[in-house]
Image (cartoon, helix red, strand yellow):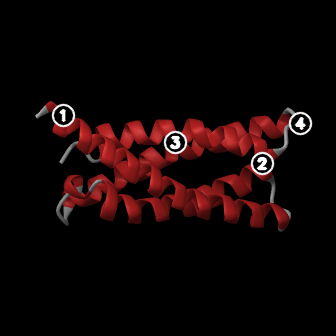
Amino acid sequence: MNELLRLAQNARASRYLGASMVALGFDMGSFLVLLEAGLHAASASALSYALGIVVHWLISSRAVFVDGVAERGPARTRQKALFVASALVGLALTAGIVGLGSALGLDPRLAKIAAIGVSFSATWLLRARVVFAAV
């Protein structure tokens, strides 16, 4: 039984990684477009991350945490709010790291890459242990 649980968790982690990669594609693509358009690095990072949040919810709730998605109604609304809260943690980390990196003279693209790892780890833990585990 323990082995089955571990396999399921590994499959879920793999699906989450895939969902994150797709969302990251939307995030990074829009980040680069916004930078080219002349938007400040931290603002571009925040806006592009917000687009990634929407994409991530759509994939996570339909392909990653299917068995943990709450039924429609108040429980689902609460879950969406928790998902957004976890995303806001990731957003704050991302914008803060990119803003700090830029202020220190780092290339914002390198700062964004560093932020990706930190944000990914934080949101995975929150979503796996809080957002979709409470159902």
Q: Could you say whether the residue bearing mark 4 is in a helix, strand or loop? A: loop
Going from the N terminus, do you reach mark 3 or mark 1 first? 1
Q: Could you say whether the residue bearing mark 1 is in a helix, strand or loop? A: helix
In the picture, the disc for residue 109 is: 2
Mark 3 neighbour density, 10 Å: few (under 14) some (14–19) many (20 or more): some
Report, in whole angstroms, how far the alpha carbon at label 2 lies from the one at label 4: 11 Å
Report, in whole angstroms, how far the alpha carbon at label 2 lies from the one at label 1: 40 Å
Please give left or right for residue 23 compared with residue 101 in the image. Answer: left
> What residue is rendered at 43% in x and 45% in y?
86
**Where does the image place residue 122, in percent across and percent down from the top left?**
48, 36
- Verify CB contact (< 8 Å) between mark 3 and mark 2: no
Q: Nearer the viewer, residue 4 or 76?
A: 4
Please give left or right for residue 18 compared with residue 114 in the image. Answer: left
Pointer 3 residue = 120
**Where does the image place residue 118, in percent across and percent down from the top left?**
57, 35
Front of the two marks 3 and 4: 3
- Verify CB contact (< 8 Å) between mark 2 and mark 1: no
In the picture, the disc for residue 105 is: 4
The amino acid pointed to by label 4 is: Gly
Mark 1 neighbour density, 10 Å: few (under 14) some (14–19) many (20 or more): few
Front of the two marks 1 and 4: 1
Report, in whole angstroms, how far the alpha carbon at label 1 lies from the one at label 4: 48 Å
The amino acid pointed to by label 3 is: Phe
- Total marks shown come to 4
**Where does the image place residue 60, in percent across and percent down from the top left?**
37, 58
